Image: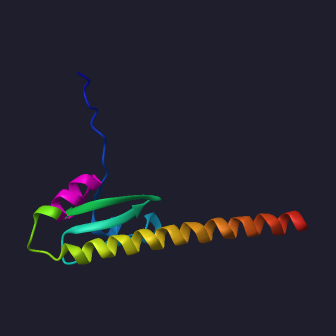
Amino acid sequence: MSIKRRTKYRTVIGEARFTDNTTGIHQRLGDTSWYYKNLNNNPGYFLRIGNTFKEFPEACFNATVNKIGEYDFAKVRQEVKKIRANRLLAQSNQINQEVSNESKKSSI
């Protein structure tokens, strides 16, 4: 039997540091303590615990969404889909911009 290695997850201490957009855009999910943050181009689910934001695996987030009935997680799921779509669009635009810049350099 193999031993499963624990994956390390990130912790950010301090709201100002977490909400700093230079480290990645963040969004609170509904009226919950969950946040979605693209921290240094690495998206993740973070739970606010006091002044600390602790990253949890997507499976943990999904399990929470499926078990807790006090929040409207259907709305949260829609928010996550929208965030992901916007992130993909931004990445696509960045790639297109880089390609455009490269062709301009080549034509000079």
The structure residue drawn at horizontal position 17% and vertical position 77%, both measured from the top left corner, is: 72
The structure residue drawn at horizontal position 45% and vertical position 71%, both measured from the top left corner, is: 85
Q: Position of residue 37 (x, y in %)?
A: 36, 65
Q: Quadrant of the rendered structure where residue 80 is?
A: bottom left
Can I make out residue 56 in this image?
no
Q: Quadrant of the rendered structure where residue 105 is?
A: bottom right
The colour scheme used here is rainbow
In the orientation shown, which residue stands out farthest toward the top? 1
The structure residue drawn at horizontal position 23% and vertical position 59%, both measured from the top left corner, is: 61
Does residue 87 sit above or below 60 in this rendering? below
Q: Position of residue 38 (x, y in %)?
A: 41, 63
Q: Quadrant of the rendered structure where residue 19 is?
A: bottom left
User: What segment carries the magenta color?
Assistant: 51-65
Does residue 72 sit above or below 87 in this rendering? below
The structure residue drawn at horizontal position 22% and vertical position 75%, both measured from the top left corner, is: 74
Check the picture and name the quadrant holding the N terminus: top left
Label count reads 0
Q: Position of residue 101 (x, y in %)?
A: 76, 68
Check the picture and name the quadrant holding the C terminus: bottom right
Taking the image as shown, residue 65 lies to the left or right of residue 16, namely: left
Q: Position of residue 27 (x, y in %)?
A: 33, 73
Taking the image as shown, residue 78 lies to the left or right of residue 63, namely: right
**Residue 84 lies within the magenta run:** no
Can I make out residue 54 in this image?
yes
**Camera-nearest residue between 10 and 16:** 10
